[in-house]
Amino acid sequence: MKKNKFDFIELLKGLLVVFSYFLLGNLLSSLFYVLLEKGIIPDKHYIRVILNFLIYLILAIFYIIIYHKQIITEWKTFQKKPKETIHYGFNYWLRGLFIMLISNFILVFFLKMGVSTNEQTNVDMIKDSMFVQTILIVLVAPIIEEIVFRMSFKKMTNNHHIYALITGLLFGFVHIITSLNNALGILFLIPYSALGIAFGYLYKKTDTIFASLFMHMFHNAVTIAIIILAIVTGVY
């Protein structure tokens, strides 16, 4: 691929991977729902929690298998300069985090839009099954999302700006699409895309998915630790 050339075929391939993520997730959910409804497996709360965990675990394994060669190659890239890669990781993460926090602050306190529906849903899920959700959010979800929303688009373009913008906005959009209640709700795209864009730049800068993957895990770990602390102290 020539420098800065945009490959629409690779864009479509990436979008198909994103589509497959939702399709497979819904198919697995429907399958488990039928098993519960038919009484093949007991319809108990802990069973539903386990099945939900299995859906994401199966998806993670599926995409790891599909992209295993690229993952191995990029792991070797990471091993060549791990300290430098992590240094870049924290640099880009802090930039994305700053934009995310500032935009969230403006939306919540100045525009009085309140907490996003997606964020409230995450809080409720953590309250419901804290241990399982912690594993999902910190370990499993970042693996799926980094492969689906970043690695699958890698060959789309060598232009760092275009790549980061497209993948970051797509990443943010899918996080708010199900919770859009009004036109202003689209503004939550800014904080939700901030880290996605930052991680897109990071991926192109380091040429290894493990840079954005480890920072994604770190960010989610910090976030869930704050949420758990808020739950324990009665804030939520």
Image (spheres, rainbow, N blue to C red):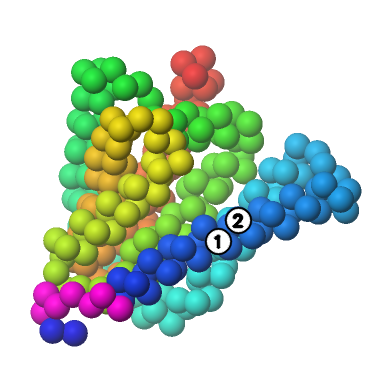
Seen as rendered, the residue at the extreme front is 183
Instruction: Give how far across and how far down residue 65 sits, in percent.
Output: 53, 76
Q: Could you tell me how many numbered marks the image carries?
A: 2
Q: Nearer the viewer, residue 226 or 167?
A: 167
Asked if marks 2 and 1 touch (Cβ < 8 Å), the reply is yes
Left or right of 65: which side holds 145? Answer: left
Q: Secondary structure at mark 1?
A: helix
The residue at the point 40 percent across, 49 percent down is 174
Q: Which residues are magenta?
A: 3-9
User: Residue 23 bears which disc, if any?
Assistant: 1
Amino acid beneath label 2: Asn
Q: Secondary structure at mark 2?
A: helix
Instruction: Give how far across and how far down residue 134 sits, in percent.
Output: 54, 42
Amino acid beneath label 1: Leu
Quadrant location of the N terminus in the rendered image: bottom left
For disc 2, the marked residue is 26
Taking 211 as reference, is 110 above or below it?
Answer: above
Can residue 202 be seen? no
Instruction: Give how far across and how far down residue 201 sits, in percent.
Output: 20, 59
Left or right of 115: which side holds 109? Answer: left
Left or right of 165: which side holds 146? Answer: right
| CA neighbours of label 2 inside 10 A, class few (<14), some (14 to 19), many (20+) | few
Taking 199 as reference, is 2 above or below it?
Answer: below
